[in-house]
Image (tube, rainbow, N blue to C red):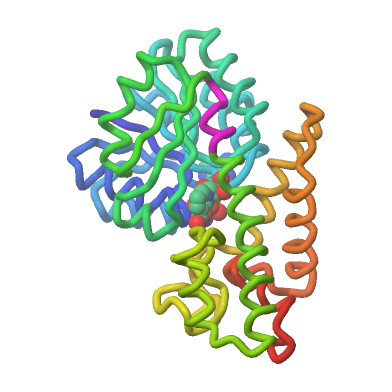
Amino acid sequence: MKIGFIGLGNMGAPMASNLLKAGHELTVFDLMQDAVDKAVSEGATAAADIPTVARSGAELIITMLPAARHVKGVYLDEDGLLAHVPKGVHLIDSSTIDPMTARDVAAKAAAQGNPMLDAPVSGGTGGAQAGTLTFMVGGEDQEFAFARPVLENMGRNIVHCGAAGNGQVAKMANNMLLGISMIGAAEAMSLGVSMGMDPEVLAGVINTSSGRCWSTDTYNPYPGVIETAPSNRGYTGGFGMDLMIKDLGLATEAAKATGQPVVMGGLAQQLYQSMSFEGHGHLDFSAIIKRYMKDEE
Ligand code: NAD
């Protein structure tokens, strides 16, 4: 299929690579020339700007951008996609943004004859490279059926979450819970170890008991417990704390808009925010355990 791809960053670049490997023809654009050059070296065609991607003959255009303001700019500006894309071209935004913006952009696209899905991902850069991302998709049934085979070239789990914006809702709810559960894991592990428990024995008990969760059994924040976790390599790699703050911000903003209480989500956001303020925002989010370990700071 002829596909346009805009946003070749940490996630977008490997996703575009996987589409090329699957045999699709890609026309790409990014503000960073290096990112475009790399995709071209893998077989993509470079576009000079967004209108060129829109008019490249692509049947589908995918965007993978940092945040809502970039998505609004790329889709809604005078030189944006909607002003230049022919009717009938399918659109997918895989950026993580707030559901309200996703719904607004999708409604504007649909009104001019461009069906659009929101399809944020989880799985991080490792999942993007391996083609094992989870896509949480919001939009019409027939549009989901159209996009699914393409998304399967970049991901393993492709989940239809309901109408436009619901992909973002699912991602937001999951990541809020992840942010909260990591703080719980950090508190429980630190308390137990401070009172004399061996961290591996404690993790073993938790992971066969009712406290078990992904933050304890796969990504335990206490160093030395899980060999492959960022806690075992100085909290490098993994899921950056600043990205977690962004996702918790989306959840608390959405909660404000709907009047829904998210007490733990708001508290979690402030805890990560205070660590980022102290200069740790580049570390994996599980580094939040440094708040609780006396010898660590
Ligand atoms: P990134 O900052 O590495 O990449 C974004 C890219 O978009 C950059 O190359 C930038 O130049 C480009 N861009 C920005 N504005 C543009 C414009 N107007 N026109 C063309 N290109 C433009 O970000 P990322 O880590 O790839 O994340 C992308 C999205 O995926 C974000 O919404 C993020 O929250 C989400 N996400 C990231 C991860 C992760 O682990 N990095 C995991 C899951 C989801």
Closer to us: 224 or 139: 224
Query: Seen in the image, is 22 located left or right of residue 152?
Result: left
Region of the chain picked out in magenta, as a range = 164-170
User: Residue 272: where, in percent of width, then height?
Assistant: 72, 63
Of residues 271 and 20, which is closer to you in this image?
A: 271
Q: Quadrant of residue 291?
A: bottom right
Whether residue 167 is situated above or below residue 275 in the rendered picture: above
Relative to 291, is 51 on the left or the right? left
Q: Residue at x 62, y 58 (%)?
A: 181
Q: Quadrant of the N terminus?
A: top left
Viewer-proximal residue, 133 or 33?
133
Q: Quadrant of residue 293?
A: bottom right
Instruction: Point out residue 88 in the picture as x, y percentages from the top left corner.
Output: 39, 12
The answer to whether residue 178 is magenta is no
Q: At x 63% / y 30%, what residue is drawn?
A: 99
Answer left or right for 146 relative to 118.
left
From this view, report whether residue 290 is shown above or below residue 79: below
Residue at 63% x, 33% y is 73
Can you see residue 32? no
The percent position of residue 193, horizontal first and vertical second, equals 63, 84
Q: Main secondary structure of the magenta part?
A: helix
Q: Is residue 66 above or below residue 80?
A: below
